[in-house]
């Protein structure tokens, strides 16, 4: 069999056109007169139809584009494995690969990553999450909040009410309540992984029933109980890494690509967390014989309030408010 | 500049890229699918096959380029690099105070990463049996990649073109083909001219946006769709001008190079690539990569004096892949 290509010696770029005449037994002679057998060669992998390199033991090599002949000689004399190339050369395998990739990718971002983040969050030392909580708290206190202007009596009433509600729970969850003036962030509440729950005066004033405030606090406690913030940090920091890894070395698109789908997925994760926290709050409210409908009313006034004051965002990362309101109302007033 | 007498004897030989989208799509999707199914292990093999596809289908004077990195080596480097990156993400997410010390340490590590990355990828690039090589030292890299960019931060970017110029000069002048050195003397003023034009582009864009906002307020919400094209225009402009400038001034022994990329055609490729990738969930990535490579090769030529037969191999030792993989994880881009 004849193999056309370019022959190079081991030390220079001198290119010699050459025809390698491989005998039926696999022997051939190089332009420098030396004789070899096909098994003495090391041959580069086939990738598409790019040129192959045949390395001879003396450091010289042959560059040839005659892929079909080389494959045939390989299967005849050296039994080189071409499995990957066969996978790459049929459209039906490509289609199968597309389906597997989309299915795995979809499963991973919707279920896999949250599962991993959940497991990792459980194993993280509590000192780490406590430190994060303390840092965020002091950061918010210096930059955003000012002291609460509610009377001590009002604050104590809310504390007592929520403590009474939580007292009926089988497992005690440690938490600390903080009252603050929301300043630029207005009517708002949030939870930190350290167990700190912050609720602003503005949100309390908006509530027209103690059960609504208890509902908000229970929702925030849900975030703490289910380690949502830690899980969210884990998931969101893994995502860009993942997307960059999948799209490969192409810097052309990573900026845009890592941007849009990441945003969409992060919104999806955050909706899931809010739903979980709502469920948690519902359970607690019902167990304590409170009416979840008051939380629904508070949600609705928040929507109206938000239209007047765009900076408010207890709602922005939350599921569509109508859906939440509906769910809270349907679940009826308490466990009768 | 070149003197016309020597120019007349230079023979232009164009680079050619012969990859096909449909062929590369199958390779790409099989790579991706196997990488997923093997939990990322195969990604090292995928990287080698992808690089080899592009190198192998790029030819100059009928000889192709060759990527010779070994997958196992890449896998090792990649595992360490990803581990370090995950550690970094976790540390900075949970202990934000560590971000500054890590950043400082990273500043001193960066030149090392750049050098090792270039050494690895050049050592594994072969053309006509001759390897590329890289001989850059730490201190000039520290100046060009860390000190000057940091200084440019404190001078409102005034020093940035100087940094970009030093980076290119350092990179090209330390690159060898066998034992022949590439040489270039890029002038700082050319870089200032390019970045000044880019700045004017940015300013005129802002002015246009402002005028639309004032004169046609009902169109203002649609301006967001213009941000990507304008951002890309500036990026592509700098990339095209710097690439052309560098290639056109680079010599390799008696040979020269020529690059005739144009801003608008490249921008059109870039934008259609981005849109196609976004709207196909990434499935158009191989098509985008192929047409980018084809355009870039079609604009590039070697101006050959005599023939390319007289380069000699140099003594080199293989590098490990950690620097290269760190560079890749961090999305650093150094390719020619």
Image: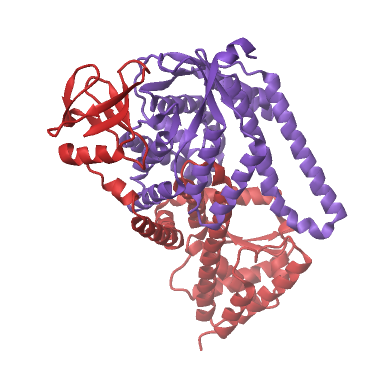
Residue shown at 36%/25% (left/top)? B319
**Residue A276 seen:** yes
Palette colour of chain B: purple
Q: Which chain is red?
A: A
Residue shown at 20%/17% (left/top)? A33
Judged left or right of residue B20, residue B256 is right
Q: Is residue A93 above or below residue B139?
A: below
Q: Name the residue furthest right.
A: B215
Colour option used: by chain
Q: Is residue B246 above or below residue A82?
A: above
Question: Percent from the top left, x then y, of residue A160?
Answer: 60, 71
**Pick the front one: B211 or A53:** A53
Judged left or right of residue A27, residue B326 is right
Residue shown at 65%/38% (left/top)? B235
Q: Is residue B272 above or below residue A333?
A: above
**Pick the front one: A302 or B86:** B86
Q: Where's the N terminus of chain B, which quadrant?
A: top right
Question: Percent from the top left, x then y, of residue B329?
Answer: 47, 39
Question: Percent from the top left, x then y, of residue A72?
Answer: 22, 41
């Amino acid at each position: 069999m004849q193999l056309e290509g370019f022959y190079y010696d081991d030390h220079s770029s001198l290119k010699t056109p050459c025809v390698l005449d491989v005998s039926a037994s696999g022997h051939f002679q190089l332009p420098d007169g030396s004789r070899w057998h096909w098994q003495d060669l090391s041959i580069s992998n086939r990738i598409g139809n790019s040129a192959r390199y045949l390395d001879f033991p003396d450091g010289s090599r042959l560059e040839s584009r005659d892929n079909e002949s080389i494959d045939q000689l390989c299967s005849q004399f050296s039994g080189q494995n071409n499995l990957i190339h066969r996978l790459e050369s049929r459209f039906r395998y490509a289609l199968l690969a597309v389906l597997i990739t989309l299915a795995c990718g979809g499963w991973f971002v919707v279920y896999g990553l949250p599962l991993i983040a959940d497991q990792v969050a459980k194993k993280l030392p509590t000192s780490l999450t406590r430190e994060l909580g303390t840092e965020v708290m002091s950061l918010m206190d210096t930059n955003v909040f000012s002291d609460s202007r509610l009377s001590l009596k009002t604050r104590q009433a809310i504390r007592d009410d929520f403590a009474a509600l939580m007292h009926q729970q089988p497992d005690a969850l440690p938490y600390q309540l903080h009252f603050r003036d929301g300043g630029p962030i207005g009517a708002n509440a949030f939870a930190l992984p350290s167990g700190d729950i912050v609720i602003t005066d503005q949100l309390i004033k908006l509530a027209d029933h103690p059960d609504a405030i208890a509902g908000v606090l229970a929702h925030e406690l849900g975030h703490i109980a289910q380690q949502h913030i830690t899980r969210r940090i884990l998931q969101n920091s893994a995502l860009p890494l993942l997307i960059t890894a999948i799209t490969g070395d192409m810097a052309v698109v990573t900026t845009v690509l890592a941007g849009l789908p990441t945003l969409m997925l992060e919104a999806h994760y955050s909706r899931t967390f809010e739903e979980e926290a709502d469920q948690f709050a519902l359970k607690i409210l019902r167990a304590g014989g409170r009416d979840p409908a008051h939380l629904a009313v508070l949600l609705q006034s928040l929507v109206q309030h938000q239209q007047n004051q765009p900076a408010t965002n207890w709602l922005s990362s939350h599921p569509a408010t109508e859906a939440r309101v509906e769910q809270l109302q349907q679940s009826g007033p308490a466990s009768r | 500049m070149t003197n016309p007498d020597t120019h007349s004897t230079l023979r232009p030989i164009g680079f050619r890229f012969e990859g096909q989208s449909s062929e590369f799509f199958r390779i790409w999707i099989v790579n991706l699918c196997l990488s997923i199914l093997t939990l990322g292990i195969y990604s090292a093999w995928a990287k080698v096959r992808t690089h080899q596809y592009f190198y192998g289908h790029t030819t100059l004077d009928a000889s192709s380029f060759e990527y010779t990195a070994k997958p196992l080596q890449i896998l090792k480097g990649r595992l360490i690099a990803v581990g370090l990156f995950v550690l970094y993400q976790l540390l900075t997410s949970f202990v934000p105070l560590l971000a500054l010390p890590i950043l400082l340490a990273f500043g001193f590590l960066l030149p090392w990463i750049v050098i090792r990355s270039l050494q690895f990828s050049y050592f594994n690039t072969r053309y006509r049996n001759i390897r590329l090589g890289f001989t850059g030292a730490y201190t000039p890299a520290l100046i060009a990649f860390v000190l000057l960019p940091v200084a440019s931060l404190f001078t409102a970017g005034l020093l940035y073109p100087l940094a970009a110029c030093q980076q290119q000069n350092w990179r090209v002048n330390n690159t060898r083909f066998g034992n022949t050195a590439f040489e270039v003397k890029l002038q700082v003023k050319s870089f200032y001219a390019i970045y000044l034009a880019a700045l004017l582009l940015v300013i005129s864009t802002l002015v246009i946006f402002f005028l639309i906002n004032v004169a046609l307020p009902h169109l203002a919400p649609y301006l967001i769709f213009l941000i990507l094209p304008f951002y890309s225009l500036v990026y592509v402009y700098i990339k095209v001008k710097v690439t052309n400038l560098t290639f056109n001034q680079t010599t390799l022994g008696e040979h020269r190079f020529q690059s005739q990329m144009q801003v608008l055609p490249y921008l059109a490729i870039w934008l259609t690539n981005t849109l196609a990738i976004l709207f196909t969930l990434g499935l158009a990535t191989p098509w985008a990569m192929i047409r980018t490579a084809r355009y870039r090769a079609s604009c590039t030529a070697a101006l050959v004096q005599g023939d390319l037969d007289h380069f000699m191999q140099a003594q080199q030792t293989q590098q490990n892949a950690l620097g290269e993989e760190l560079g890749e994880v961090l999305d650093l881009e150094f390719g020619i």
